[in-house]
Image: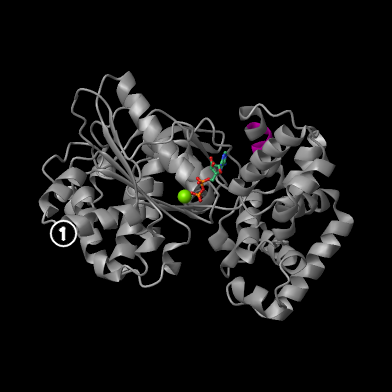
Amino acid sequence: MLANQLWERTCERLKKIFSAEVYRLWIARIKVLDFESNNLSLGVWDEFAQLWFKENYVSALEDALREITGESITVQVQVVSFEDHSEPSAEQESVPPKEDPAQNTDNQQNSAPAIPPTVYTPRAAAEVQNVLNPKYTFESFVVGTNSNMAHAAAMGVAQNPGKSYNPLFIYGGVGLGKTHLLHAIGNRVIDNAERAGKQVRVVYVTLEKFLNEYIEAVREQRCERFRRKYRRVDVLLIDDVQFLTGREGLQEEFFHTFNELYNSNKQIVLTSDRPLSEIKKLEERLVSRFSWGLVTDIQPPNVDLRMAILKQKAKDMHFQVPEEVCTFLAQKIRANVRELEGALIRMGSYINLTQASWSIETAKVALQELLSRQVAQAPNIEDIQKKVAMTYDIRVSDIISKKRPANIAFPRQVAMYLSRELTHQPLIAIGEAFGGRDHGTVIHACKVVENQMDVDDNVRDTIQKLKNELEF
Ligand code: ADP
Ligand code: MG
């Protein structure tokens, strides 16, 4: 069968499996590259899409391919150029565009339906408001498995503002690099525009400031000016939207501003220190708007990444930090990157003042208070499920599902085993988190895994590696 034929038939199946939205955003945009030796190569538009695909859709795709051909066909996904946003293919056209007002704006161009267009008009020079920090760039951001999705999505947005993921919603605990990524997007967008001799308006603002500005505008009867200001923006970066809690009266206004921008295809990127579901009293319609595009998270860095970050920061600050001191700090300071950075700065100034040397002894003295605040952090079950899914190249939803093929059942058992070993959660809670299984199933899973570790070195190594990576 030819690649195109095979893909067409697969798409027909996938249309039935996935929602119209998922189909339109993900499947319809794929390019078929090649079909050879039972291997189907597909092209996607950026690294985020590649990762996302691998994690969420490849196994469903392979299932569909097996049903169609009766053979087992592997799917490979690679990043290819999507420069030509020209005519959508026949397949793409056959998918009805999303029924929302955003798709019906005046400047709707003839691009693929999943990609809302952005119109760049050449203007004089880049304009930045609320100043971006030039140090917060993609280059200075150290990427690890904790943040690769968020990082890739941010890069995607920066390369094609308004076209790929809109809005992009990034959440994660404090000090994990959300603000850094927001600025990195802004900096990259401006660099690109400058290089192309175009002008672009980027606004970075914390939600708090945005709302206060609005209140002031209302008070001084300058609402129209306020709206105009934000309507002129090409890329709006809003930091810390969790502050919508407690500002319930203002959600209405925020909702309208958001809609206005979205409807004129402005790129919006939002961050929050918690997932949408945990932003208290957030109106349902805002939750739904925020999830229209892409929601992705940043997890705390593991010890290896903390090492890498420390080395990078030490280099940036021109500190000669011996390996053992880096190791010591990376092991002791676990909460977030801001604290790691803070520790280096504090130690650096202490050494500067006292002429002490970069040693573990000095660290203990200079960082006494910081070190005493560190509490052991255990990974949670969700972390474990994600990590295991990634390692075994399956979906988290498979781990939680009732499916029982061996390629899913064993990783699921591994995830249960690791949850028992690492989380201090009761067996009942572990069973619950795995699609409502009972505690007997968890005990059985642990036995199976322990037995396998005894007889199979590969299994033992994989699990040991997982454990190391999961333990902060
Ligand atoms: P958040 O907004 O999530 O609270 P920030 O973006 O303010 O966190 O990050 C806190 C500090 O840590 C910043 O100085 C930032 O540059 C640094 N930082 C965070 N994550 C990384 C990373 N992955 N690589 C390099 N620096 C980082
Ligand atoms: Mg921040």
- Going 45% across and 68% down the picture, which residue do you hit? 278
Q: Split into 4 quadrants, where in the image is the C terminus?
A: bottom right
Can residue 236 be seen from the camera position used here? yes
Find out whether residue 55 is within the magenta segment: no
Q: Is residue 203 above or below residue 468?
A: above
Q: From the viewer's perspective, is 127 left or right of 135?
A: left
Residue 6 spot, x, y in % from top left:
42, 41
Residue 162 spot, x, y in % from top left:
29, 41
Q: From the viewer's perspective, is 69 left or right of 124?
A: right
In depth, the one of 233 and 389 nearer the eye is 233
**Residue located beneath label 1 in the image:** 218
Residue at the far front: name it.
353
Residue 414 spot, x, y in % from top left:
72, 61
- Going 67% across and 32% down the picture, which residue do you hit? 314
Q: Which residues are magenta?
A: 308-312
- Going 55% across and 50% down the picture, which residue do you hit? 175
- Would you say the magenta stretch is mainly helix, strand or loop? helix
- Going 85% across and 49% down the picture, which residue do you hit? 457
